[in-house]
């Protein structure tokens, strides 16, 4: 990819401003995995992170080999310790802006007004979940209100599960969650009308369809007990599945001209992300992205893997630049020596009358 976006620029790093090979913006699984890889590559790396991971409301993270069932904050604490163990630095806070330096590299401004400079940026700011505006959904998010069966399906296996239909992927979601329970109900809510083929597939799998708009969730003794319809009827449910819109956190990239674009799944828009190549390289040279800011469907282990891939690409890019500089530095004295030797030969020839 090549840069073609208008970017804010600054003349040079300010006096006393620390410079790193790489600044990582965001300290989740993607950011810490990238920082760990870079620190092990003997790069100076700084992670800027506010310590508020997207999955903090969940009691446990799943699908992460050897760490399955660990608390999200526990995983992050272990990751931070590993990064700093190799010399990486972590600063608490948020990056609010980034700009390109005329002298090369970038300046990253933090929310406390301080700034750091970097030769390369790895942005792993993740996304914001925007669940449907049904009373009770946001309050139970990450507890009994779920969206990913691979993250939470096992924990609600054999329970009464309700799928809230808000878009064209609702039937697919209901059939997917049927893998974990025989008691799955699809609430039509505000979704488009289902087709005959949809009803046939749902019936074949024993998924009930509940017509009517959902107006709220019923909670008893701090546990979800049902889904309330507009007419007042309550359908007993122990877990509710929703399809949030996923919006990438891209504010820090605005000054570099990077904007979010729509990401689709099965032909339908599920949210916004920053487009990048398989390594995470963006349209702006020197800027990589990894994790949910680049791929909305990445789970924790996928985000971690993306961070490693991006870090390897960044290190290779830095090595290539450093090699070009070394060749240029080596060639300069060589050229000067050749010029001096040529002059000496000319003078010698003249002395001998040649």
Image (cartoon, rainbow, N blue to C red):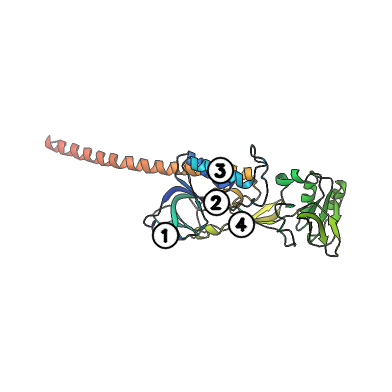
Numbered disc 3: secondary structure: helix
Front residue of 322/30: it is: 30
**In the image, which is nearer the foreground, mark 1 or mark 2?**
2
**Among the two numbered marks 1 and 4 on one chain, the one whose residue lies closer to the N terminus:** 1
The answer for how far apart the CA atoms under marks 2 and 3 are is 13 Å
Left or right of 72 on screen, residue 175: right
Question: Which label is found at residue 249?
Answer: none
Numbered disc 4: secondary structure: strand
The answer for how far apart the CA atoms under marks 1 and 4 are is 27 Å
Specify the quadrant that holds the C terminus: top left
Residue at the outermost top position: 352
Residue 311 seen in the current view: no
Question: In the rendered image, which residue does mark 4 sit on?
Answer: 261
The answer for how far apart the CA atoms under marks 1 and 3 are is 33 Å
At horizontal 44% and vertical 42% (from top left) the residue drawn is 320
**Among the two numbered marks 4 and 3 on one chain, the one whose residue lies closer to the N terminus:** 3
Q: Residue 74 placed where, x, y %?
A: 61, 44
Question: Which label is found at residue 10?
Answer: 1
Q: Residue 259 placed where, x, y %?
A: 56, 58
Q: Are the residues flagged by discs 1 and 2 in contact, CB closer than 8 Å?
A: no
Q: Are the residues flagged by discs 2 and 3 in contact, CB closer than 8 Å?
A: no
**In the image, which is nearer the foreground, mark 1 or mark 3?**
3
Front residue of 68/221: it is: 221
The answer for how far apart the CA atoms under marks 4 and 3 are is 30 Å
At horizontal 59% and vertical 48% (from top left) the residue drawn is 291
Numbered disc 2: secondary structure: loop
**Among the two numbered marks 2 and 4 on one chain, the one whose residue lies closer to the N terminus:** 2
**Among the two numbered marks 2 and 3 on one chain, the one whose residue lies closer to the N terminus:** 2
Question: In the rendered image, which residue does mark 2 sit on?
Answer: 26
Question: In the rendered image, which residue does mark 3 sit on?
Answer: 79
């Amino acid at each position: 990819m090549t840069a073609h976006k208008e970017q804010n620029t600054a003349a040079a790093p300010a006096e006393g401003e620390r410079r790193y090979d790489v600044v990582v913006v965001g300290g989740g699984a993607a950011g810490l995995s990238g920082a760990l890889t870079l620190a092990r590559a003997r790069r100076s790396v700084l992670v800027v992170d506010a310590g508020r991971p997207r999955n903090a409301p969940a009691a446990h993270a799943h699908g992460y080999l050897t760490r399955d069932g660990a608390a999200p904050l526990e995983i992050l604490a272990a990751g931070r310790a590993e990064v700093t163990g190799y010399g990486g630095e972590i600063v608490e806070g948020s990056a609010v802006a980034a700009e390109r330096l005329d002298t090369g590299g970038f300046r990253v401004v933090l929310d406390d007004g301080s700034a750091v400079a970097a030769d390369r940026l790895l942005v792993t700011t993740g996304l914001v979940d925007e669940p449907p505006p049904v009373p009770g959904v946001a309050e139970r998010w990450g507890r009994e209100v779920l969206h990913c069966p691979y993250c939470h399906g096992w924990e609600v296996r054999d329970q009464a599960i309700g799928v809230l239909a808000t878009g064209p992927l609702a039937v697919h979601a209901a059939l997917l969650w049927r893998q974990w329970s025989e008691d799955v109900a699809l609430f039509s809510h505000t979704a488009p009308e289902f087709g005959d083929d949809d009803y046939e597939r749902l019936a074949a799998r024993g998924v009930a369809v509940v017509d009517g708009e959902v107006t709220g969730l019923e909670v008893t003794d701090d546990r979800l007990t049902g889904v309330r319809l507009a007419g007042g009827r309550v359908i007993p449910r122990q877990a509710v599945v929703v399809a949030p819109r996923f919006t990438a956190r891209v504010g820090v990239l605005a000054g570099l001209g990077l904007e979010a674009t729509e990401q689709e799944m099965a032909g339908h828009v599920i949210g916004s992300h920053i487009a990048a190549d398989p390594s995470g390289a963006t349209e702006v040279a020197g800027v990589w992205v990894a994790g949910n800011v680049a791929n909305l469907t990445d789970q924790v282990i996928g985000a971690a893997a993306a961070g490693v891939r991006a870090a390897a690409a960044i290190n290779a890019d830095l090595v290539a630049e450093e090699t070009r500089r070394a060749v240029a530095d080596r060639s300069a004295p060589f050229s000067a020596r050749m010029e001096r030797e040529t002059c000496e030969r000319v003078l010698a020839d003249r002395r001998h009358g040649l």
